[in-house]
Image (cartoon, rainbow, N blue to C red):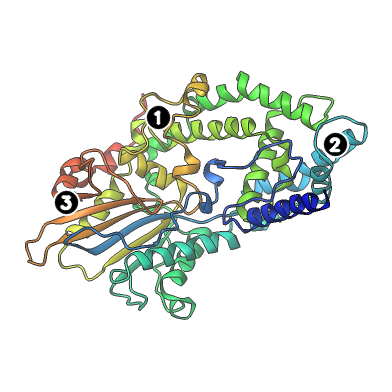
Amino acid sequence: MAYATRRSLLVRVLFAQLVLSSKTSIVLSECHNGSSLVNVSLATKTPYRFVANRDDSPPTYQGCSPIKFWSMIRHGTRNPSDSIIQRMNEHLPLIRDEIIKAHRKGKGSLCSHELRQLSKWSPQLEEAEEKILTHEGEDELLLLGERFQKRFPHLLPEVYSNSSFKFQFTATQRAEESARSFTVGLFGRRISQHVWFPEGIYRDPVLRFYKLCENWRKSVDKNPEASKEQHSFAKGPEMVKVQKEVTQRLGLSELISYDDVILIYVTCSFEIAWFPKKNSPWCAVLSDYDLKVMEYAEDLDNYWIDGYGYKINYEQACPTIKDMFNFFSSPDTKEKAIVYFSHAGTVLKMLAHLGLYRDDEPLLASNFNQMLHKRQWRVGQISSFASNIAFVLYKCGNESSAPLKILTLHQERPVRLPGCPSHEDLCSIHKFEDAFSSSIKNCDFQNMCAFKSN
């Protein structure tokens, strides 16, 4: 009996060590009543380690060699906005105290371990630290740079040359520091200090084109009609169920508000992103179902504001495709690699422009159950922190007239675009040009983005 007990204890210790050593693990309570946090998606606040491709072996295509590289990369994990930090600092401790008081009275269903962690919790940030890149964000970009360098060692050599590389970031701290961390991954810390970066532009016409698109800003971004599906879902039966179950789980006397549930979800999301091997006590408050509902609410917002909800969302992304194709088509350019550092809004609009992750039916407040498991538009998978789209130009043959082909990568994995062959990764440059001819030849950004009031 003693031997069996020791063996059982050993199994439990080995399992705990396995959980702690996992690259994407989160330390879980033995009596966890909330989310299991396994294969969880946290919308735009999903850490890149949840979706990264860690296979850094060079892709091989017989007879073809990579000759140019172009990429658009979202900044890494950051801090929240100042308004969210303020609510984390001022309101969340009040919720915490109410939870602990309720459980002392025998109400609620959080276990003792979860309550201890919650009682130890305190706010992490000051408002002055809003939206800055975190240490986890630096690591995400550094490791991304290392993996790209290993995949394309001749195209992205460890020796830096100002004439071979072009790096550009938007005029934000999180994009600039992401760029610097990426070059540390490419060249090492010592050489990266000598990399030249042009000054960032806030309304960059390629990296943040939507800031210049008045039509989109007024007819979509600032238009309440574009947010009606998310607002409807926020008041719908799924979200009300979440509020009721969270209220019961916490032992509160009054129904928790929608805004407070969102605050808990956002705090859980950011703290999971910040701390790879540490659980956020606020995640214990939410079940797997709760997280799926919250994720869908964010996906609805991004679908209608940045995705397939309106044509202008993705049509305006043509400057990015045109920039890439012009780079690939120019035989005289000395640069071998162009790498841009931008934001989720850019990546999502580009993905929709490329025709990727398009569902047969639109995301609506009314079809949550139908879209729950089958939808392709899951922002946590396609636009997490440090999300990236890359195009690699290949030359297939040694002669000067050898055919050119394009490899498209998303999250470091090959994807096949509409209009390109569905049975192979490489798409001939001519097929690519045909598939996206309107973007390359007829990108009339000024006209499509001119606001025309009714």
Which of 194 and 224 lies nearest the eye of the viewer? 194
Residue located at (19% from left, 46% from top): 432
Quadrant (top left, top right, bottom left, bottom right) of the C terminus: top left
Describe the element under mark 3 as helix, strand or loop: helix
Q: Could you classify mark 2 by the number of other residues whose Cα lies within 10 Å: few (under 14), some (14-19), or many (20 or more)?
A: some
Describe the element under mark 2 as helix, strand or loop: helix
Q: Which residue is mark 1?
A: 309
- Give the mark nearer the N terminus: 2 vs 1: 2
Q: Amino acid at mark 3?
A: Ile
| Residue 92, quarter of the rendered image | top right
- Give the mark nearer the N terminus: 2 vs 3: 2
Identify the disc placed on residue 429: 3
Residue located at (59% from left, 54% from top): 131
* Residue at mark 2 to residue at mark 3: CA–CA distance: 61 Å
Select label 1 or label 3 by which is in front: 3
Does residue 449 appear in the picture of this structure? no
Q: Could you tell whether 285 is left or right of 350 in the image?
A: right
Q: Position of residue 272 (x, y in %)?
A: 63, 49
Cβ atoms at labels 2 and 3 below 8 Å apart = no
Which of 371 and 449 lies nearest the eye of the viewer? 371
Q: Position of residue 386 (x, y in %)?
A: 48, 54
| Residue 59, quarter of the rendered image | bottom left
Q: Is residue 299 above or below residue 270?
A: above
Identify the disc placed on residue 98: 2
Q: Amino acid at mark 2?
A: Glu
Describe the element under mark 1 as helix, strand or loop: loop
